[in-house]
Every structure is written in C-alpha cells, then in structure tokens.
Amino acid sequence: MDIASIVGLLLCFGFMILGIVTGDQGAAALGNFYDLTSIFVTFGGSFMCTLIMTDGIPQYLSNLKSFKLILKKKTTNEIEVIKQVIDLSNISRKEGLLALEEAAANVDDDFLKKGLLLIVDGTDPELVRSIMETEQIAVEDRHKTVISFWENLASMGPAWGMIGTLIGLINMLKQLSDISSVGPNMAVALVTTFYGSILANWIATPTATKLKANNDKEITVRNIMVEGLLSIQAGENPRVIEEKLKSFLAPKERGALTEGEGGEE
C-alpha cells in the first residue's frame, strides 16, 4: 500500500471536517453541508459528463477502478531494475547470450522478459528497439486515457457545482418575497460549489497527478530496460552498462549502486 496517498487522502478529509466543527456551532455545523439535491446535481452531473467523454461504459468503469492504483505502492524502482540488468549482463558475459533464456524464466516483469527472449532469438537490435518502444508507446497511450478521465472529472466538478449554485440562486430569487428563506436558500446554493471543489481538489486532481507520476516512473524504468538489453546484446562491458544506466538516476541515488553490486570487469 502507498502510505503517502492513504495518509494524504485521510488528512485532507480530516482537516476539512476539523475546519467545519471548530466553529461556533461545533459538530452540529456538519448538517449545514449536507444537501441531497446538491449531491445529485454536482456528482451526478460531473460523473455523467465524463461518461459522455469516455469510449463506452466498460472503459468508463475501468477508469473509475484506476483510483485504487494510487493506493498501491510500485514494487519496481529504477535502482532495482539497473541491478537486475547488470546481473543479466554478467550472465551474458560469462555464459553467452543463450544463457539469458534460462535467466528469463526467473524474471517477473513481462516487458523485460519479452526483450530477453527477443535477444536470445537473435533478433536485429533495431527491431528489438522498435518492438519494445512500440509496446511502450501503447502502454503510455492507455495510461494517458485514464489520466485524461480524472483530469476531465476535475474540471467537471467545479463546473457542475456552479450550475447547482445557479439553480439554487434562481430558486431563491423566485422566493425573494420571503426574506426569511434567503439565508437558507443561499447556503444550499453554495453547497453545490463546495461539493464541486471537493470532487476536484480532494479526489480527481490528486488522482490524475499521482497517475501521471506513476506513468513517468514506469516509462523511465522501461527506458532503462530497453537501453540495458540493447547494451547486453551489443556485448558491452557490464561496468560500462552500469555507468550508462546510472544516467537515469538522480545524483543522490547513484550511490545506492555500490561497487560490490555493480558489473564485473
């Protein structure tokens, strides 16, 4: 589980509730922020608009399910992948490229395993790069579709909140002769804007941003795999491969690749 995402979501909600109940009304103030009609207008309108923008209901449901991805911690990082590539390069240097077929059986990542088997089959290096980059582009396009869904939802939330506010204001002005109803009706009208802001800034925007970060990290990891595999196929020294792949890391992360864990001469 990604503790940062879970803690962030819970604390955002907690501080918002704290801000409501610490007023003069205390916990009773929570009732001021509940209105069923506003929920229908804001959440119903926002989610149905994003349904219109989506390529079918199955894709829509898949996009909604992607929310759980921000709660999962990525099991693979750049340093681990570089170490794995260096280990594979050492095997290739000692036993030859064909030995990588046996090593591929112990590789969990399907993308890396596919590249290894292409190398073992003697596929031309340019064709290996083309195949793997094509798959990488396809994965990134799918990720962008999901990210776009959450970005659209983030824009629809405040928009439908404003629509709900306008509906409330129109109804209020229709009853303007009853001065005592102005305050309560105004409060109800503004609740829809409140709901829209919550949907956008508590759920949709953080989800889109986290998915973007996850996508960027996955693309970096796959670039490391591609460059590493092509270097292995070219017969480069494991030490040279290690130094090449270190360029993908921030300077402070490069120390994690100690000499004892690096490639052999």
Image: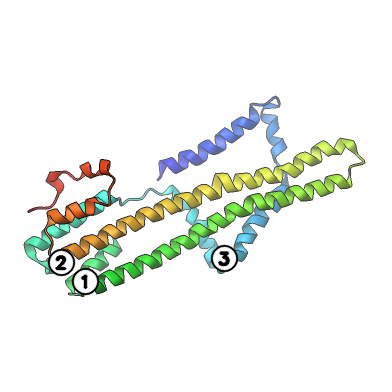
Give neighbour class at mark 2: few <14, some 14-19, many 20+ (Cα, 10 Å): few
Q: Nearer the viewer, residue 28 or 122?
A: 122
Q: Nearer the viewer, residue 66 or 224?
A: 224
**What type is the residue that disc 3 sits on?**
Thr
Which residue lies under the disc numbered 3? 54
Which residue lies under the disc numbered 1? 125
- What label sits on residue 234 in the rendered view? 2
Q: Earlier in the sequence, mark 2 or mark 1?
A: 1
**Horizontal arrangement in the rendering, residue 67 relative to residue 43 (left or right):** left
| Cβ–Cβ under 8 Å for marks 1 and 3 | no
**What type is the residue that disc 2 sits on?**
Ala
Quadrant of residue 256 in the image?
top left
Please tell me whether mark 3 sits on a helix, a strand or a loop. loop
- What label sits on residue 8 in the rendered view? none
Relative vertical location of residue 124 with respect to residue 232 in this rendering, above or below? below
**Horizontal arrangement in the rendering, residue 236 relative to residue 138 (left or right):** left
Give neighbour class at mark 1: few <14, some 14-19, many 20+ (Cα, 10 Å): some
Q: In this view of the protein, can residue 105 be seen by the observer?
A: no
x, y percentage for residue 21?
Answer: 64, 29
Q: What is the CA distance from the residue labelled 1 to the residue labelled 3? A: 38 Å
Q: Nearer the viewer, mark 1 or mark 3?
A: 1
Q: What is the CA distance from the residue labelled 3 to the residue labelled 2? A: 44 Å
x, y percentage for residue 140?
Answer: 41, 62
Q: Nearer the viewer, mark 3 or mark 2?
A: 2
Please tell me whether mark 2 sits on a helix, a strand or a loop. loop
Please tell me whether mark 1 sits on a helix, a strand or a loop. helix
Quadrant of residue 120 in the image?
bottom left
- Image point 64% across, 60% down: which residue? 48
Q: Earlier in the sequence, mark 3 or mark 2?
A: 3
x, y percentage for residue 117?
Answer: 21, 70
Give neighbour class at mark 3: few <14, some 14-19, many 20+ (Cα, 10 Å): some
